[in-house]
Amino acid sequence: MNRVIRLLVAPAVLCGLLLQASAIPAADRWLLVDTGKRTLSVMEGELILRSFENISIGRDGASRTRFLGGQQTPLGTYRISSLRKETRYHRFFGINYPSLQDALRAYEAGLLSSADLEAIRTAQEHGREPPISTPLGGNIGIHGLGNGSPDVHADYNWTDGCIAVTNDQADELAEWVRLGMTVIIL
């Protein structure tokens, strides 16, 4: 049943996210993470400049709703909010999860306090990464393997919600990624 629902909902979500992508100015580069195909593409308008295959996502797949301690990769539109070199995962390109849209959706569902909503809103307005201590969690990004196993990476989704690429892919991706760059995860 869950698979049937995903098959019915996925095209609608994809269509909505691609409509958001078409609103990005053609000259702007952005990242498209396709969790179903396990690819990460560097885009310019609708043109694929570089595509990385066999990425890994969260152990529990991807979802519009992600919570602290969950192992799902969040679906939505985000921005690169930090660039970190020499981390435990080789490189880390932080994204501004949870977005204000994620926070508003959780607040309206009664899953987030007004104080947490305001903290997320303030971080977003100042271009900072949102707090990781809210019920939505945080510290989500794109990263390499570090000293992790390339064999595990090739065969399994293994992250706690991030998008993982190999260390070589992370190095190449670093040439493209910029602060504020749009990241669409579908």
Image (cartoon, rainbow, N blue to C red):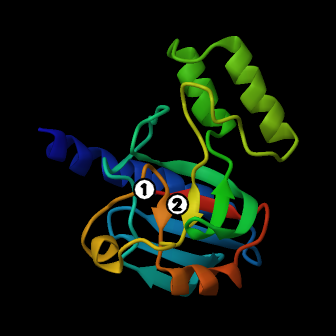
Look at the picture and state if 16 lies above or below 39.
Answer: above
Mark 1 residue crowding within 10 angstroms, few (<14) / some (14–19) / many (20+): some
Q: Which residue is drawn at 56% across and 26% down?
A: 105
Look at the picture and state if 125 lies above or below 52.
Answer: above
Q: Residue at x 38, y 61 (%)?
A: 35
Instruction: Residue 17: give x, y in percent of width and height.
Output: 52, 54
Number of marks: 2
Mark 2 residue crowding within 10 angstroms, few (<14) / some (14–19) / many (20+): some
Instruction: Residue 5: give x, y in percent of width and height.
Output: 21, 41
Instruction: Residue 54: give x, y in percent of width and height.
Output: 36, 77
Instruction: Residue 102: give x, y in percent of width and height.
Output: 58, 34
At label 1, which amino acid type do we have?
Leu
User: In which quadrant of the rendered view does residue 184 lie?
Assistant: bottom right
Tag on residue 14? 1
Direction from residue 87 to residue 76 in the image, left or right:
left
Tag on residue 18? 2
Q: Which quarter of the figure is the C terminus placed in?
A: bottom left
In terms of depth relative to the viewer, which is nearer, 98 or 184? Answer: 98
Direction from residue 82 to residue 60 in the image, left or right:
left
At label 2, which amino acid type do we have?
Leu
Secondary element under disc 1, as helix, strand or loop, is helix
User: In which quadrant of the rendered view does residue 114 lie?
Assistant: top right
**Dot 2 and dot 1 residues touching (CB under 8 Å):** yes
Q: Which residue is drawn at 62% across and 39% down?
A: 98
Tell which residue pokes out farthest to the right in this image: 126
Q: Which quarter of the figure is the N terminus placed in?
A: top left
What is the spatial separation of the Cα atoms under label 2 and label 1, in whole angstroms?
Answer: 6 Å
